Amino acid sequence: MTDTRATEIAAPEIAVRLFAGAAAEFGADDATVRARTVGELVQALTAGASPEAARVIGRSSLLVDGVACTDHDRALGRGTRVDVLPPFAGG
């Protein structure tokens, strides 16, 4: 008998580089998370993070493959790199 249930496709692994305050809060310069969209990536980074780390991520600019991205519905694929740039100089 064939299983007709929809099979969820695994989210790709996304390379994340953390800079300045983001790296300091997470205690690492880079991470790998599974996410299909920018929004899922933000959720994955903030899940279980300290309140301060989550705040820094929420205020950070995100670059997807070097291009600024504010669209949390933007799809991410295998080989994508996301840079997390927190506000600098109090910005």
Image: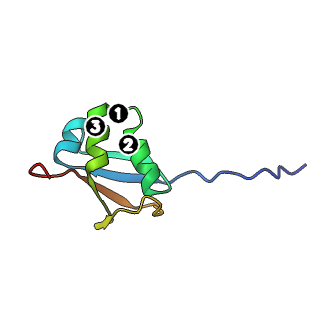
Where's residue 30, x and y in %? 28, 46
Judge the density around disc 2: few (<14), some (14-19), many (≥20) Cα neighbours within 10 Å. many
- According to the picture, the residue beneath numbered tag 1 turns out to be 49
Where's residue 48, x and y in %? 40, 31
- According to the picture, the residue beneath numbered tag 3 turns out to be 53
Q: Residue at x 48, y 63 (%)?
A: 75
SS state under label 2: helix
Where's residue 17, x and y in %? 27, 51
Judge the density around disc 1: few (<14), some (14-19), many (≥20) Cα neighbours within 10 Å. some
Tell me, yes or no, if residue 3 can be seen here: yes
- According to the picture, the residue beneath numbered tag 2 turns out to be 45
Q: Residue at x 45, y 63 (%)?
A: 74
The reply to whether dot 1 and dot 2 touch (C-beta < 8 Å) is yes
Give the left or right position of residue 21, taking residue 75 as reference. Answer: left
The relative height of residue 75 versus residue 46 in the rendered view (above or below) is: below
Give how far apart the Cα atoms at labels 1 and 2 are.
Answer: 7 Å
Q: Residue type at mark 1: give it.
A: Ala
Give the left or right position of residue 42, taking residue 5 as reference. Answer: left
Residue reaching furthest to the front: 91
Residue reaching furthest to the left: 89
Judge the density around disc 3: few (<14), some (14-19), many (≥20) Cα neighbours within 10 Å. some
Residue reaching furthest to the bottom: 67
Q: Residue at x 30, y 46 (%)?
A: 57
Give the left or right position of residue 16, taking residue 41 as reference. Answer: left
Where's residue 69, x and y in %? 34, 64
Q: Comparing marks 3 and 2, which lies closer to the viewer?
A: 3
SS state under label 1: loop
Give how far apart the Cα atoms at labels 3 and 2 are.
Answer: 9 Å
Tell which circle, 3 or 2, labels the residue nearer the N-terminal end. Answer: 2
Q: Residue type at mark 2: give it.
A: Leu
The reply to whether dot 3 and dot 1 touch (C-beta < 8 Å) is yes
The number of numbered badges drawn on the structure is 3
